Amino acid sequence: MKLYYAPGVCSLSPHIVLRELGLPFELVKVNTKTHQTADGGDFYAINPKGSVPVLELDGGERLTEGPAIVQYLADQHPAKGLAPANGTLARARLQEWLNFTTSELHKGFGPLFNPAFPDAAKTLMRERLLKLFTWVDTQLAGREYLLDSGFSVADAYLFTVSNWGQLVGVDLTSLANLSAYRARVAARPAVQEAMKAEGLKG
């Protein structure tokens, strides 16, 4: 398998999941500004949507969109317990967290990385994100991870997105439950390996 990624962005989530599962894979770095792969290839030829992550399977098929990739990987290795069984309430809870992270948190950060976005609008986005993360903090009270079953693919995604706050002025340090959660996830060997491979600080 190949994972097309860019350091620290949403592709870190499936990268973590691949390492949690202990699967063999190749990392292919993508420049998200030039849309070229590390060897100079045209990334649009890999994914016409132009975004990472892309998981290329051994048979040559390609899967895009982080939540789809991580659920596919987890479902191929159910004994690892990274996603509850399909058709269960627990699986719906997993998808609830993945959807929330995608639509509310992940997309909320986009404008903050855009230098052309008006400062006044960025202030509103920061306030909204802090409000959303404050709600996440309440949900983590007394919990190690998002699901009762333990670490899941949803944690890999939430951890990845929560790391962006410090880059764009969304201060999450006052959220004690979230801070403890992020430290807990960061301490996992697979997470440390993924971050080291991407040149990120743990």
Image: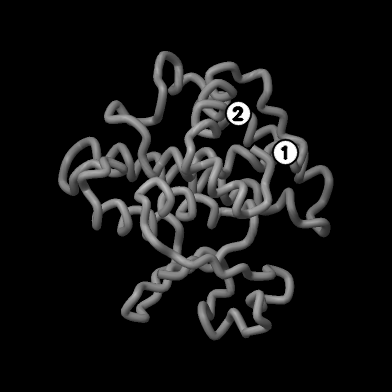
Q: How is the image coloured?
A: one colour
Dot 2 crowding, Cα within 10 Å, few <14, some 14–19, many 20+? few
- Residue 124 is tagged as 1
Q: Which three-letter amino acid code belongs to the residue tagged 2?
A: Lys
Q: Nearer the viewer, residue 126 or 174?
A: 174
Farthest left residue? Answer: 87
Quadrant of the rendering where the C terminus is positioned: top right
Dot 1 crowding, Cα within 10 Å, few <14, some 14–19, many 20+? few
**Which residue position holds label 2?**
131
Q: Is residue 16 shown above or below 126?
A: below
Q: Earlier in the sequence, mark 1 or mark 2?
A: 1
Q: Is residue 45 shown above or below 89?
A: below
Q: Nearer the viewer, residue 33 or 126?
A: 33
Q: Nearer the viewer, residue 95 or 131?
A: 95
Does residue 101 appear to the left or right of 89 in the view shown? right
The residue shown at (45%, 54%) is: 14
- Measuring from the top left, give residue 19's x and y in whole percent: 43, 50
Does residue 113 appear to the left or right of 64 in the view shown? right
